[in-house]
Amino acid sequence: MRPLSELARRLPHDAAILDVGCGNFERIYRNLARRRADVSVAGLERFEDGSIDGPLPIYGPCISPRFKRYACDVEHDRFPFADESFDGAFLSHVIEHVVAKRRVLAEIRRVLKKGGLLYVETPGPRSLTLRWPDWLPHDPLATLNYYDDKTHVDTPMSMADLRSHLADAGFSIVASAPVRELGLLGTPIYIFMIGVGALPFLPPLTREFLYGAGVRNLVGWAISALAEK
C-alpha cells in the first residue's frame, strides 16, 4: 500500500487540504492536486517579510481559487485556522527542517477533522549512502545525500522513527513505505534514467535531474507514512 496513493483514494470529495511548508505549491500539485481536481489547498509558508507572496511565485497551474497561501512560521506560530478545519494535511520534505517536530505535529492534529489524514514524506537513512559523482555537474544546492542540504536538522529518520513520532502525536498509522514513484516495478526505468544521466553530451540540468531521480527512486531515498487522527 503506497501512502500517497492511499491518501488520494481516501480523501472525501471536495476535501480541504492543509499543505504545511507549501513553497509555491508545485509539490502538492504534482503529487496530489493534479490527480484530485476537487480538492482545495491552504498552504503555510514562512516568508521573512511576513507577506503571503514570498520569494517564490505560485506555480502556474496553482494560480486559482483552489489554492491560497498564508504566511506562518510553522515551527513557532499557531496555525491560523480553527480546530478541525481540514480533511487532510500534506507535510512533504518539511519535517527534516524542523527541530520542534512534536509541536508541528500537534498543530496539524489540532486543525484536522476527526478521521482526517496526514501524509508525511522525508529523506530516510538511505540518503546517507549517496553522493553526487565527481563527473556529474549539478547545482550545489541539489540534494542527494541528506547533508547536502545544510538546513536539514539532526539525522534522517528511519521508518520506525517516523511511525513513532506520529504515534506519539496521537495519530494512528495507516501505511508506511519507501517512496518510489513507479513502485518496485519501475526499477528498469530508474536504472535507465541513471544511465541516460551519465551521458556527457546532454545539458547539465537534464543529467542532474535524470540521474538524481533515478537514484532516489531506485534506493528508496525518501520514506513516507499516512496517518489518521
Image (spheres, grey):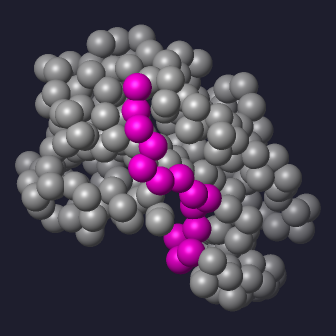
Residue pictured at 53% horizontal, 77% vertical: 182
Q: Which of these two is toward me, 41 or 59? A: 41
Q: In this view, does 165 lie above or below 36?
A: above
Question: Would residue 220 be seen by someone viewing this image from the given angle?
Answer: yes
Q: In this view, does 66 lie above or below 84?
A: below
Looking at the rendered image, the quarter that the C terminus falls into is top left
**Residue 49 covered by magenta stretch:** no
Indicate the quadrant where residue 22 lies: top left
Indicate the quadrant where residue 19 lies: top left
**Residue 53 percent location from the top left of the image:** 26, 33
Q: Which of these two is toward me, 113 or 149? A: 113
Q: Is residue 5 above or below residue 123?
A: below
Say left or right for 31 vs 116: right
Q: Which of these two is toward me, 135 or 121? A: 121
- Count numbered badges in the picture: 0
Residue pictured at 23% horizontal, 40% vertical: 115
**Residue 214 percent location from the top left of the image:** 68, 73
* Residue reaching furthest to the right: 134
Say left or right for 94 vs 44: right
**Residue 181 covered by magenta stretch:** yes
Q: What stretch is highlighted in magenta?
A: 170-183
Residue pictured at 50% horizontal, 23% vertical: 168
Indicate the quadrant where residue 89 lies: top left
Residue pictured at 60% horizontal, 84% vertical: 185
**Residue 114 percent location from the top left of the image:** 20, 34
Question: Would residue 75 be seen by someone viewing this image from the given angle?
Answer: no
**Residue 62 percent location from the top left of the image:** 22, 55
